[in-house]
Image: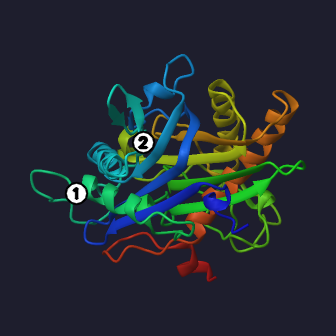
């Protein structure tokens, strides 16, 4: 296992970025349509075609997911991913037509120093097309794709990923775009909130501080009093090779949201647009009660690890006043 979302067979990930724009897009594509659901906990989400993921609605499976910077402008990235899928003949059969099913979500990175004066039309549709066209089994972490322009309250944000398996060998993996209003670290120190779940030093191996002081626990928000609901979001995609129904996928997404609380302080605030997508490729049957509970437990830990890796692997944006990267201050 490569400790990536693509440790789930039949899943590929691609990025496209624009350095001048300081933003980008990440596409997650499934070689075969996957059962999927969504759980939204933040107070300011930005999503596309996500109503269909409700368990009461008809469509069961999706072809891809799109994560993007650009706030509402970035929702157009899904159109680029759809265009590529349509060229491949992918999509839900409706009469004689094929309709690619591509839900998505966005983060706000419009005030990170990049040039957002793009003219009449935003570039995200083309970035979405480029991202899915580049999808493969390996992909960059940190300041890449939808995490290119992401920030947190104290350090550069980014895109992270992690994977794990249950005791019975069912795999689960996560990808996170960390643009949180809060912090992924304990205060301004080198310790990640997700440290208890770290595997093999994947985000520096610093553990937790020897003791906690009140100053470490003070709430810090990106943008301070000027922060708004649209400006901050963490997005996660959780994929498993288990056989799940759509309601079970929804439950997996709900349990996996616990990983946000283990990795970000504070989280699920009115200032966040936190979203978890959950998808299942349907290879390994599991017990619908105990098995799903165990899978959710492992998924939550994996989400926490992916969030920490996104900040750990990030590099600072090259603009005056840009936030430092974690590695700028604490090394590798």
Q: Residue at x 80, y 53 (%)?
A: 165
Residue 258 badge: none
Q: Are marks 2 and 1 in contact (CB under 8 Å)?
A: no
Q: Earlier in the sequence, mark 2 or mark 1?
A: 2
Other residues around mark 1 within 10 Å, as few (<14) / some (14–19) / many (≥20): many
Residue 238: give x, y in percent of width and height: 62, 46
Q: Name the quadrant of the C terminus.
A: bottom right
Residue 104 badge: 2
Q: Name the quadrant of the N terminus.
A: bottom right
Furthest-bottom residue in view? 331
Q: In this image, 302 relative to 331: left or right?
A: right
Residue 41: give x, y in percent of width and height: 55, 33
Furthest-left residue in view? 120
Q: In this image, 96 relative to 244: left or right?
A: left
Other residues around mark 2 within 10 Å, as few (<14) / some (14–19) / many (≥20): many
Q: Residue at x 67, y 44 (%)?
A: 261
Q: In this image, 306 relative to 15: left or right?
A: right
Q: Which residue is mark 1?
A: 123
Residue 51: name its quadrant: top left
Q: CA distance from mark 2 to mark 1?
A: 16 Å
Look at the image and tell me whether residue 239 can be seen.
Answer: yes
Q: Nearer the viewer, residue 323 or 290?
A: 290
Judged from the image, the secondary structure of the residue bearing numbered disc 2 is: strand
Residue 290: give x, y in percent of width and height: 87, 31
Look at the image and tell me whether residue 186 can be seen.
Answer: no
Residue 277: give x, y in percent of width and height: 56, 40
Q: Residue at x 34, y 72 (%)?
A: 321
Q: Nearer the viewer, residue 82 or 219?
A: 82
Q: Nearer the viewer, residue 275 or 330?
A: 275
Q: Is residue 271 above or below residue 250?
A: below
Q: Residue at x 78, y 57 (%)?
A: 197
Q: Is residue 156 above or below residue 62?
A: below
């Amino acid at each position: 296992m490569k400790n990536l979302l693509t440790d789930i067979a039949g899943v590929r990930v691609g990025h496209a970025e624009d350095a001048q724009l300081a933003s980008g897009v990440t596409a997650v594509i499934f070689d075969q349509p996957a059962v999927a659901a969504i759980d939204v906990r933040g107070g300011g989400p930005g999503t596309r075609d996500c109503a269909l993921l409700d368990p009461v609605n008809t469509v069961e499976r999706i072809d891809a997911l799109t994560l993007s910077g650009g706030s509402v402008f970035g929702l157009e990235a899904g159109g680029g991913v759809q265009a590529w899928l349509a060229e491949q003949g992918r999509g839900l059969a409706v009469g004689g037509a094929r309709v690619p099913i591509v839900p998505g979500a966005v983060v706000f990175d419009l005030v990170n120093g990049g040039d957002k004066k793009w003219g009449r039309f935003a570039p995200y549709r083309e970035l979405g097309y480029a991202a899915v066209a580049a999808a493969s089994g390996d992909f960059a972490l940190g300041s890449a794709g939808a995490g290119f322009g992401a920030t947190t309250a104290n350090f550069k944000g980014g895109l992270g990923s992690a994977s794990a398996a249950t005791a019975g060998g069912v795999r689960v993996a996560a990808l996170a775009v960390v643009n949180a209003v809060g912090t992924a670290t304990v205060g301004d120190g080198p310790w990640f909130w997700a440290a208890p779940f770290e595997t093999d030093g994947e985000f520096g191996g610093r553990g937790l501080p020897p003791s906690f002081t009140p100053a470490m626990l003070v709430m810090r928000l990106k943008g301070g009093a000027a922060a708004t609901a649209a400006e901050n979001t963490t997005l996660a995609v959780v994929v498993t090779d288990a056989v799940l129904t759509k309601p079970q996928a929804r439950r997996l997404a709900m349990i996996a949201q616990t990983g946000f609380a283990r990795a970000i302080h504070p989280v699920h605030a009115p200032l966040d647009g936190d979203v978890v997508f959950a998808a299942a490729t349907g290879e390994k049957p599991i017990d619908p009660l105990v098995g799903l509970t165990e899978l959710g437990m492992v998924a939550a830990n994996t989400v926490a690890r992916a969030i920490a890796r996104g900040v750990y692997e990030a590099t600072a944006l090259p603009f005056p006043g840009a936030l430092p990267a974690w590695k700028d201050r604490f090394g590798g």
